[in-house]
C-alpha cells in the first residue's frame, strides 16, 4: 500500500489537471478481502442511514454557527446602524479570508477518512501534527490581512464612522484566530474518523455562550466598558478559545489514542504538508469563488436601492438556511467515500455518491415545496415593510428553483473530496460562477443587450450559474466514481 503522488499522470509535475488518484490510499487485495462489505452495507437504505447519521450533527453545527452571526447582527443592531454596519463590514473581510485559509485544513477530513478505512490509524497522527503547523501559518496570514484592512475600506470608499467600528472589531477577533484554526484542525480529525456529534455539541455550547458574552462586551458590565459593535469581536475571540478547549478534551479521549496525534512532537515535513496543500488549496479556492460570487452580486444590486438589497438579502438568507442540509450531506459524503476508498471498496464509494446525490435531490424538492407554499409567511418573519416583503416573497420562488441545483453541486463536491478530487471542481466553480453566471446576471440585470430586468435578471444569472456548476460537478463525480472501480 502506498500514499503518494501519481507518477507521470495528470497529477504529476507537468500535468495541468489533478488526477483524483493522486494521494489516494491504495489497499492491497488482502485488505479488500478483509473489508468486504456486509449485506447491510451493500444496501442503499443502509448507506442512506449512515449518511444521515453523519450529516444531522453537522447540519446542527452549521446552523449553530449561523446563529452566532445572527446574534451579532441583532445585538449590534440594537446599539445603532453604525455598529451594525461596522460588524458587517468586518465580517466581509474576515470570512472570505478565513474560508480560503481553512481550505488547507479541510484536506484533513478525506485524508483521515481514507487512512481510517485502510486501517492505518497509526499514520493519521503525523498528518494532524503537520495540519497544526499549517494552522499556525494560516493564523499568521489571516491576522495580517484582517488587522491591515484599512486601505481596503478606503479604496472601497466605506463611510469612516463604520470603518471606525470594523477595524477594532477585526483587531479584537484576531485574538481568537489561533484557537479557531486549531479547533478546525482537530474537528476535522474527529469528523474524518466519523465522529460528527462533537461539532454539534461544541457549536451549540458556543452559541449559548455567545449571547451573554455579547451582552457583556457590547453593553458593558462590572469592570468592562460598553464597546458597542467592537464588543462582538472580543466575545467571538473568547468563544473561539472555548471551542478549542472543548475539541481538545474530545480528541484526547481514549477512542482517539490509536491515532497517536499527541504521542510526540514533529517538525514540519514538506511531503505531508504538500499533500494537504495540494488537496486543500483547491477546496479553499472553491469556497472563495462561490462566496465571492454571491457577495459580489449583492454589491452590484446596491445600485438598485436599499429595498432591492433588503429583499435580496432576505431571500438569500432563506436559501442559506435550506443549504445547510446539502452542505452537511456533502461533508458526510466526504467521510463515507473516503472511508470506502481507503478500505478498498470503490463500489461502495460509488454507491455512497449515488445515494448522496439522489437524497439531496429529494430533500431539495421537499424544501422547494415548503418555500413555495409558505414564502409570504416566511418573508413576514423578516420585515414589516410591505414593498420589501412582497419582493422577497417573489424572489423566494427563485430560491425554490435554484436550490435543486445548489443542493446537487454542494453534495457532489463533498463526495468528490472523499476521492481527494478537488482541483477540477475548483476550476468548474470558477467557470460556472465567474465566467458564465456573472456575465449572464449582469447582462440581464443591467440590460446590456435589452431591457434591464433588475434584481430578477441577477437571479436568473444565479440560477444559470448553479445549473452549470451542478451539471459539471455531478458529471465529474460519476466519472471519477466509475474510473475508481
Image: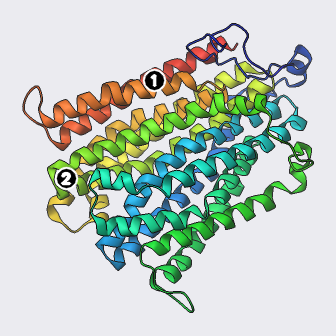
Label count reads: 2
Foreground residue among 42 and 304: 304
Please state if 243 lies on the left or on the right of 66 as rendered. Answer: right
As helix, strand or loop, the secondary structure at mark 1 comes to helix
Foreground residue among 478 and 134: 134
Q: Mark 1 points at which residue?
A: 428
Placement of the N terminus among the 4 image quadrants:
top right
Quadrant housing residue 50: top right
171 above or below 363? below
The chosen color scheme is rainbow
Separation of marks 2 and 1 at Cα, in angstroms: 30 Å
Residue shown at 32%/67% (left/top)?
162
> Do the numbered discs 2 and 1 sit on residues whose CB atoms are within 8 Å?
no
Q: Name the residue under label 2.
A: 308
| Image x and y of residue 338, in percent | 71, 30
Quadrant housing residue 39: top right
| Image x and y of residue 3, in percent | 80, 22
As helix, strand or loop, the secondary structure at mark 2 comes to helix
| Image x and y of residue 35, in percent | 86, 25
322 above or below 235? above
167 above or below 119? below
**Of marks 2 and 1, which one's residue comes earlier in the chain?**
2
Residue 53 appears in view: no
Foreground residue among 360 and 127: 127
Residue 143 appears in view: yes
Q: Residues within 10 Å of mark 1 (few under 14, many from 20)?
A: many
Residue shown at 77%/40% (left/top)?
130
| Image x and y of residue 66, in percent | 49, 58
Residue shown at 66%/46% (left/top)?
137
Please state if 400 lies on the left or on the right of 120 as rendered. Answer: left
Q: Which residue is outermost to the left?
A: 451
Amino acid at each position: 500500500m502506498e500514499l503518494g503522488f501519481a507518477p507521470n499522470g495528470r497529477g504529476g509535475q507537468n500535468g495541468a489537471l489533478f488526477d483524483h488518484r493522486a494521494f489516494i490510499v491504495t489497499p492491497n487485495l488482502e485488505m479488500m478481502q478483509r473489508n468486504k462489505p456486509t449485506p447491510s452495507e451493500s444496501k442503499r437504505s443502509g448507506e442512506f442511514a449512515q449518511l444521515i447519521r453523519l450529516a444531522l450533527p453537522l447540519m446542527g453545527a452549521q446552523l449553530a454557527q449561523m446563529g452566532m452571526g445572527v446574534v451579532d447582527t441583532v445585538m449590534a443592531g440594537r446599539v445603532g446602524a453604525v455598529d451594525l454596519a461596522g460588524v458587517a463590514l468586518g465580517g466581509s473581510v474576515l470570512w472570505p479570508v478565513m474560508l480560503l485559509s481553512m481550505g488547507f485544513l479541510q484536506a484533513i477530513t478525506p485524508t483521515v477518512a481514507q487512512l481510517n478505512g485502510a486501517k492505518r490509524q497509526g499514520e493519521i497522527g503525523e498528518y494532524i501534527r503537520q495540519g497544526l503547523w499549517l494552522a499556525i501559518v494560516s493564523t499568521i496570514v489571516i491576522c495580517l490581512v484582517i488587522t491591515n484592512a484599512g486601505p481596503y475600506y478606503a479604496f472601497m470608499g466605506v463611510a469612516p464612522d463604520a470603518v471606525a467600528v470594523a477595524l477594532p472589531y477585526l483587531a479584537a477577533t484576531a485574538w481568537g484566530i489561533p484557537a479557531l484554526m486549531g479547533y478546525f484542525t482537530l474537528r476535522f480529525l474527529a469528523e474524518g474518523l466519523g465522529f460528527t456529534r462533537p461539532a454539534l455539541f461544541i457549536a451549540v455550547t458556543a452559541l449559548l455562550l455567545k449571547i451573554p458574552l455579547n451582552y457583556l462586551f457590547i453593553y458593558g458590565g462590572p469592570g468592562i466598558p460598553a464597546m458597542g459593535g467592537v464588543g462582538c469581536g472580543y466575545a467571538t475571540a473568547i468563544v473561539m478559545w472555548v471551542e478549542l478547549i472543548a475539541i481538545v478534551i474530545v480528541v484526547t479521549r481514549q477512542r482517539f489514542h490509536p491515532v497517536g496525534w499527541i504521542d510526540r512532537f514533529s517538525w514540519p515535513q514538506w511531503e505531508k504538508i504538500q499533500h494537504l496543500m495540494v488537496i486543500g488549496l483547491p477546496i479553499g479556492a472553491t469556497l472563495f469563488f462561490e462566496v465571492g460570487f454571491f457577495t459580489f452580486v449583492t454589491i452590484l444590486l446596491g445600485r438598485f436601492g436599499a429595498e432591492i438589497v433588503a429583499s435580496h438579502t432576505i431571500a438569500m438568507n432563506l436559501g442559506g438556511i435550506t443549504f445547510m442540509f446539502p452542505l452537511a450531506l456533502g461533508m458526510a459524503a466526504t467521510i463515507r467515500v473516503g472511508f470506502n476508498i481507503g478500505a478498498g471498496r470503490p463500489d461502495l464509494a460509488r454507491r455512497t455518491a449515488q445515494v448522496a446525490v439522489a437524497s439531496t435531490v429529494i430533500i431539495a424538492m421537499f424544501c422547494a415545496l415548503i418555500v413555495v407554499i409558505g414564502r409570504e409567511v416566511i418573508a413576514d418573519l423578516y420585515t414589516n415593510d410591505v414593498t420589501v416583503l412582497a419582493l422577497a416573497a417573489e424572489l423566494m420562488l427563485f430560491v425554490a428553483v435554484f436550490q435543486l441545483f445548489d443542493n446537487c453541486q454542494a453534495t457532489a463536491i463533498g463526495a468528490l473530496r472523499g476521492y481527494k478530487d478537488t482541483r477540477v471542481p475548483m476550476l468548474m466553480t470558477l467557470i460556472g460562477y465567474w465566467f458564465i453566471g456573472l456575465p449572464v446576471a449582469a447582462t440581464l440585470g443591467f440590460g446590456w443587450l435589452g431591457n434591464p430586468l433588475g434584481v430578477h435578471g441577477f437571479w436568473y444569472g444565479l440560477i444559470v450559474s448553479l445549473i452549470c456548476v451542478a451539471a459539471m460537478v455531478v458529471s465529474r463525480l460519476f466519472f471519477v466514481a466509475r474510473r475508481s472501480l
